[in-house]
Image (cartoon, rainbow, N blue to C red):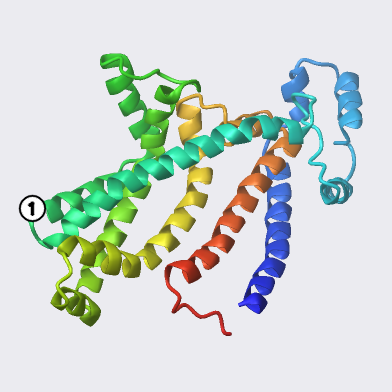
Amino acid sequence: MKRYFIHRLLLLLPTLFGALSLVFLLVHLIPGDPVDVMLGETASGADKQELRRSLGLDQPLPTQYRNFLTKLASGDLGRSLFEQASVNQIIGQRLPATLELAFCAMIAALVISFPLAFIAARRPGGIADRGALLFSLLGLSLPNFWLGPLLMILFSIQLGWTPVSGRGGWLHVILPALTLGLGMAAILTRILRASLIQVARAEFVKTARAKGLSENQVWLKHMLRNALLSVVTIMSLQFGALLAGSLITETVFSWPGIGRLTVQAIQTRDYPLVQGCVLVIAVAYLLVNFFTDILYKLVDPRVSYGE
């Protein structure tokens, strides 16, 4: 197991390097000039050239790439071209908002999906089962950029129950968390339902019932634990998707997180800030998947890593 984890840790570095290199090239291929965004197209050529020189944008692309990697090795993500502030500081201010939204969306997904999956799996083919499957179909079909404004119109404008946008108290996070977590809840409902139905046919479940255990004990103690392995996989992958999917949701609800910051950085052609945001999302995604392997062993001791 130790050998496997060391191998996975060593794979993180080239994966991150490849992601950063790809983002660096793609960002610099985006049409438009950050100097034009900062000074305006009516600025004189001399002013543009001076600003381009002060920002280091007049250097060849390989030189800019080398400088970027050199700073990154020391933990410096550079300075924002547009805000003229440290990228580390800007991301540090926005990251808590994104983590708060992601965790709230995860909690919303679990609260919705687990009861639905249990109700559906108890009587496959029944009315509750069909309702749960319909919910999962709708959850997968509704895009965030449509669902977010719809919830905003209904609960904020029409009913006045929640704030329209921004970050403040717990009421501000309800609609963004539901928007972001509904798709995940739909996937978890379908996966957990299928796993529970499959585990219900196992011999150890029949043995547990034969011992006189109550139905709740059979479902919670025996069936749920054996059905959780596939759910843990989906949860880990979806948590990384929550960070990436926050771009749309945070923009819709004016949530001051990494997702909205990334969109703003792309619009202003702020190369260092875009690279820093993508680095944070990539690291989070890789770390979540890495720790998922540890959870596998905790959830199911039968999982082997070639020991």
Query: What residue would you read off at disc 1?
Result: 127
Measuring from the top left, give residue 281's x and y in whole percent: 61, 47
- The relative height of residue 126 versus residue 250 in the rendered view (above or below) is below
Q: Is residue 262 visible?
A: no
Q: Name the residue rendered at 36%, 64% in the picture.
A: 228
Q: Quadrant of residue 260?
A: top right
Measuring from the top left, give residue 92's x and y in whole percent: 69, 34
Measuring from the top left, give residue 57's x and y in whole percent: 85, 36
Q: Nearer the viewer, residue 304 or 9?
A: 304
**SS type, badge 1:** helix
Q: Nearer the viewer, residue 256 or 295?
A: 295
Left or right side of 286 for 295: left
Q: Nearer the viewer, residue 26 or 303?
A: 303
Measuring from the top left, give residue 159's x and y in whole percent: 26, 16
Q: Quadrant of residue 267?
A: top right
- The relative height of residue 292 versus residue 106 in the rendered view (above or below) is below
Instruction: Please tell me how many numbered marks the rendered image carries.
Output: 1
Q: Is residue 296 visible?
A: yes
Residue ranking furthest to the bottom? 307
Q: Name the residue rendered at 40%, 18% in the picture.
A: 164
Quadrant placement of the N terminus:
bottom right
Residue ranking furthest to the left? 126
Q: Name the residue rendered at 64%, 34% in the picture.
A: 266
